[in-house]
Image (spheres, rainbow, N blue to C red):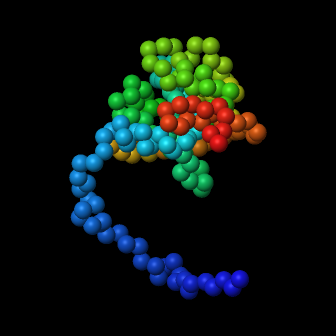
Amino acid sequence: MLLTAWPLSPPSACPVNRSLPPEHLQSPASPSFSEREFRNALGQFATGVAVVTALAPDGSKIGLTISSFNSASLTPPLVLWSLMKSASSMPLFETVSHYAVNVMGAHQKELALQFSRKGIDRWAGVEFQMGVTGVPLIAGAIASFECRNGPHHDAGDHVILVGEVAHCQHVAGVPPLLYHGGNFYTEQLI
């Protein structure tokens, strides 16, 4: 098989188009679908499950379950996640200096559910240790990312939080907890 390469211009010769998108893309019309339809469609994307933890200014532990976690950059090491603006913990996560993203293993479904509930002591019976940055790390997590609270970006009804990773660790060979279609999965979807 003969492979040919297209001639490439050096990077400096490749102009970056920084013009605005066509007018019909600048101000979108009302969507032709409901919020429920949008949520259902998004739910078809399987994700991992994590619990974000931190210490409030008064020293109390805070934590919540998320499925909106991504890597953002290898150099520098950055991760991102999003939180609804109306979340009761939003003011705390806007101001804490550090937090940890604890990636849940398949064996931690009940723990993920516990950290997703409202009106309870989410930390009741939870084993944890303090990380090198002084934030609580959940015992048994298959990975943890201790982050300096970086830039925040407005995104509709959510805020995207960028974490500058100061320390990370992981355990190999343990299956992850997955989230798909509004359900947790402790086994592969296939």
Most foreground residue, 35 or 63 = 35
Image coordinates of residue 40 in percent, x first then y, are 42, 39
Residue drawn at x 24%, y 48% is: 30
Is residue 67 in sight in this rendering?
A: yes
**In the image: residue 37, left or right of residue 104:** left
Q: Residue at x 76, y 39 (%)?
A: 173
- Say which quadrant the C terminus sits in: top right
- Above-or-below relation of 82 to 65: below
Residue 167 visible somewhere in the drawing: no
The quadrant in which residue 101 appears is top right
Hey, which residue is sitting farthest front in the picture? 190
190 versus 4 height, above or below: above
Indicate the quadrant containing the N terminus: top left, top right, bottom left or bottom right. Answer: bottom right
Which residue extends farthest right?
Answer: 173
Expressed as whole percent of the image width and height from the top left, the position of residue 174 reads 73, 36
Residue at x 70%, y 36% (from the top left corner): 175
Q: Residue at position x 30%, y 65% from top?
A: 21
Q: Is residue 96 above or below residue 42?
A: above
Nearer to me, 128 or 44:
44
Residue 11 is situated, as x and y percent measured from the top left of the image, at: 51, 77
Image position, residue 15 (x, y; %) = 42, 77
